[in-house]
Image (cartoon, rainbow, N blue to C red):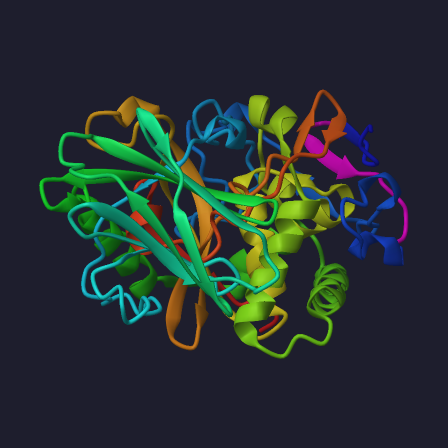
């Protein structure tokens, strides 16, 4: 499927020439073949590849004039197709406000806090015990691998479940690979071990860095936020884009009343309907590429655009959502020894009832756009409400900001 957008490049100016109207079908899942968004007429964005910095930062610099410089993304965008499972460790005494584990698992590590597929894990000296909640009618399966593959004894009572893996002494193992399948959705984790059971591998320090970034997030000015809506657009043109964001957000959420459920529904819609733009990643990425107007029109972007869209859709529902910029990792997770294997990345933290929830909508999908073609991938719930320690195995924040799109 070729892009519905064409560009005319002349005298260093990138001019949007698409002309189509939004149809109701843009709310449907993976509706790119019939989806189009009309960028308001007269919108012009500056394109200056000769000034492109060697950075993944596409956001305007608060200390300089707003620009829309092309950004060469050689190592700047982590490829979602190359990411692996995350590793988990012990959780500090629930200081982050994460949901408490079941009372019988007082020493449990939180892997996922979503009540539709929550996962807590602990070790009692001979057994790995996984517990949590999921709907009663959801099929449940699991496996634990450390050389051999062990399947659990499963106990269910209403929405509560418990998985008992008899493993004996695990101290000689570096990691245990846990997978829990809820219906057709598999969540996978690598658990670091120690003489006493599970270890955090030092990632509690990175979790603290991530938490501090959100606690000290900056408020992006209206001027800079506008560039994430439509670079170079007029107030009227940006208002038109935001009206479409509001309509889309309302349609996604429907009659959902609970804020947590809204945050989940929006995350799923973004991961199911937006495609990772490998063509842009391998060429150049500018503000236009990650803008709301572009994403609404084409359903494709890179990680910064995923984060931008999720935050805007949450904002339309009155949810406080932060855009977090930082490092992520490929392969074996070690920020200190694998520096060359890091890449700049952007994700979200949404605040629900005072609790900070990690969300990475781009890592939850393998939808891709390559060589002018859209390819449907697999969507997972792995990176929605993932535990702080687990998330910190592959995400380390540099800074966070809040954008008041509708202010």
Question: In the image, is 254 to the left or to the right of 287?
Answer: right
Query: Where does the image place residue 178, in percent across and percent down from the top left?
Result: 37, 40
Q: How many marks?
A: 0
Q: Position of residue 241 (x, y in %)?
A: 74, 59
Q: Residue at x 57, y 22 (%)?
A: 282
> On the rendered structure, is 210 left or right of 274?
left
The answer to whether 19 appears left or right of 155 in the picture is: right
In magenta, the rendered stretch is 10-22
- Verify whether residue 256 appears in magenta: no
Which quadrant holds residue 334?
A: top left
Please tell me which residue is depicted at 30% across the width and 22% down the height of the picture: 340
> Is any atom of residue 340 visible in this view?
yes
How far across and how far down the image is residue 129, in percent?
30, 52
Q: Quadrant of the C terminus?
A: bottom right
**Looking at the picture, does residue 317 appear above or below residue 303?**
below
Q: Is residue 13 magenta?
A: yes
* In the image, residue 332 above or below residue 106: above
> Which of 151 and 347 lies nearest the eye of the viewer?
151
Give the residue at x 80% y 53%.
Answer: 28
Residue at the left extreme, as displayed: 195
- Give the residue displayed 30% in from the left and 63% down from the top: 216
Q: Main secondary structure of the magenta part?
A: loop
In this rendering, the answer to whether 10 lies above or below 390 is above
Q: Quadrant of residue 5?
A: top right
- Name the quarter where the N terminus is drawn: top right
């Amino acid at each position: 499927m070729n892009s519905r957008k064409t560009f005319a490049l002349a005298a260093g100016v990138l001019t949007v020439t698409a002309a189509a109207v939004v149809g109701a079908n843009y709310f449907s899942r993976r509706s790119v073949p019939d989806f189009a968004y009309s960028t308001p007429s007269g919108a012009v964005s500056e394109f200056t590849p000769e000034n492109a910095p060697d950075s993944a930062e596409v956001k305007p610099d608060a200390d300089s004039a707003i620009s829309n410089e092309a950004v060469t993304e050689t190592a700047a965008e982590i490829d979602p197709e190359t990411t692996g499972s995350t590793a988990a460790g012990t959780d500090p005494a629930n200081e982050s406000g994460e949901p408490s584990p079941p009372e019988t698992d007082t020493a449990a590590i939180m892997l996922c806090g979503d009540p539709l597929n929550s996962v807590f894990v602990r070790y009692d000296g001979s057994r790995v015990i996984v517990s949590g909640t999921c709907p009663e009618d959801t099929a449940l399966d699991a496996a634990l691998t450390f050389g051999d593959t062990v399947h659990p004894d499963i106990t269910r009572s209403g929405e509560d479940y418990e998985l008992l893996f008899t493993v004996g002494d695990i101290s000689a193992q570096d990691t245990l690979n846990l997978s829990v399948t809820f219906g057709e959705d598999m969540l996978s984790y690598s658990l670091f071990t120690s003489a006493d059971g599970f270890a955090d591998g030092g990632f509690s320090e990175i979790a603290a860095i991530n938490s501090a970034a959100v606690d000290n997030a900056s408020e992006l000015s209206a001027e800079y936020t506008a560039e994430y809506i439509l670079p170079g657009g007029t107030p009227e043109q940006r208002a038109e884009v935001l009206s479409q964001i509001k309509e889309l957000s309302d349609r996604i959420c429907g009659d959902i009343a609970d804020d947590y459920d809204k945050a989940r529904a929006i995350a799923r819609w973004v991961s199911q309907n937006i495609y990772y733009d490998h063509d842009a990643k391998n060429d150049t990425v500018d503000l236009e590429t990650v803008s709301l107007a572009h994403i609404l029109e084409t359903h494709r972007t890179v990680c910064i655009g995923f984060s931008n869209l999720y935050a805007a859709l949450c904002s339309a529902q009155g949810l406080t959502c932060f855009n977090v910029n930082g490092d992520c990792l490929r392969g074996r997770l070690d920020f200190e020894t694998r520096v060359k294997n890091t890449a700049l990345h952007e994700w979200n933290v949404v605040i629900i009832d005072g609790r900070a929830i990690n969300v990475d909508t781009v890592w939850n999908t393998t939808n891709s756009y390559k060589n002018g073609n859209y390819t449907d991938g697999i969507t997972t719930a792995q990176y929605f409400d993932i535990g702080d320690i687990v998330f910190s195995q592959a995400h380390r924040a540099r800074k966070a900001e809040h954008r008041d799109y509708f202010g």
